[in-house]
Every structure is written in C-alpha cells, then in structure tokens.
Image (spheres, rainbow, N blue to C red):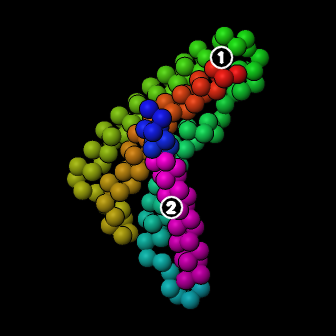
Amino acid sequence: MGQLAKLARGLINAFAMLGVIAYGAAALVTVADIIGRRFGLPVEGVVDLVQLFVVTGAWLVLPFAFLTAAHVSVDFVLDLLPHAFVVPLKILGTVLSLGLLGLMLQQGYTTFLTRTMFGDTSQQLGIPIAWYWYPLLVGMTVSLLAVLLELGASLKQERQS
C-alpha cells in the first residue's frame, strides 16, 4: 500500500505543478496582452485563454490542498478536546468531505454532459467548452483520493503521538 500511496502523492504533486504553471500562463498572457496593446498587437482571445488557465489552475491545485491539509481548519478546537475524540472527528470530517466532493463531482459531471451535448465553444477562440470542464472533473476525482491519503497520514500521526 505504501508504494501505491507514494505514486498517488506523486500524481497529486504533478497536478499541483501543472496548476501553478497554468496560473503562470494566465499571468503571462495577461501581461503580453497589456504590452501588446501598447503596440497595437493585442493577444487574440485573451479572455478565453485566461479563463481556461485560471480554471485549470484552481482545479488542479485543489487536491494538493486536501493532501497537505492546507485548507481552512479549526485546529484549536481539536487541541482542546480529549485525545479520544480527535480520531472520530477526523474520520467524520473525512466522510463529510468525501460526501461533499462526491456530490460536487456527480453534479459537475452532469453539468459537463449538458454543456458539451451541443458542442459549445468559447466565444472568442472557439475552444471546446469541454476543455474548461476537464480540469474540474480531474481535480474533483483526484481530490477524493487526496482526502483519503490525508486521513491515512493523519491517523498514522495520531497513532505515533
């Protein structure tokens, strides 16, 4: 199981790097457009590109936030509770997270099917709308895995302390 978990962590880290690269691409396209406008050479479809890059960045970085427990949490409450309550609360939090992420993935997939049914494209460049949805579906799916990995690491840490 250790090798599989290591492989999954590597995948999550790779997606996070791709997400950061996508954010960088959004920034570069924006700066190129601003500079290009000074010389009468704006970037064609800048809105479509920036939206695609930002959406990609957000959804691909999300699993890393779950894996590293970098999201907002209320640790001081857990620190005040007796140790016997910490593990059940972490498990409950994981179950709730998995349920919410699963629901979001299911609804996202349903919306993806609806939005792509007619072959919609972006307004300026004609990028297929599916390209905007793939990062969401991948990010949600990998986030489910990340939540489970984080719970495993958290429970291991609790056993050691």
In percent of width and height, residue 107 lies at 36, 35
| Circles 1 and 2: CB atoms closer than 8 Å | no
82 shown above or below 45: above
Which amino acid type is shown beneath numbered disc 1? Val
Q: Secondary structure at mark 1?
A: helix
Q: Which residue is mark 1?
A: 86
* Residue 50 can be seen, yes or no: yes
Which amino acid type is shown beneath numbered disc 2? Ala
Q: Which residues are magenta?
A: 10-37
Q: Quadrant of the C terminus?
A: top right
Q: Earlier in the sequence, mark 1 or mark 2?
A: 2
For the stretch drawn in magenta, what is the main secondary structure?
helix
Q: CA distance from mark 1 to mark 2?
A: 37 Å
- Give the image quarter of residue 139: top left
159 shown above or below 84: below
Viewer-side residue, 103 vs 45: 103
Residue 35 within the magenta-colored segment of the rendering: yes
Q: Residues within 10 Å of mark 2 (few under 14, many from 20)?
A: many
Residue at image coords 38%, 44%: 137
Viewer-side residue, 121 vs 31: 31
Q: Which residue is mark 2?
A: 22
Q: Secondary structure at mark 2?
A: helix
In percent of width and height, residue 48 lies at 43, 65
112 shown above or below 145: below
In percent of width and height, residue 45 lies at 43, 71
Residue at image coords 39%, 55%: 132
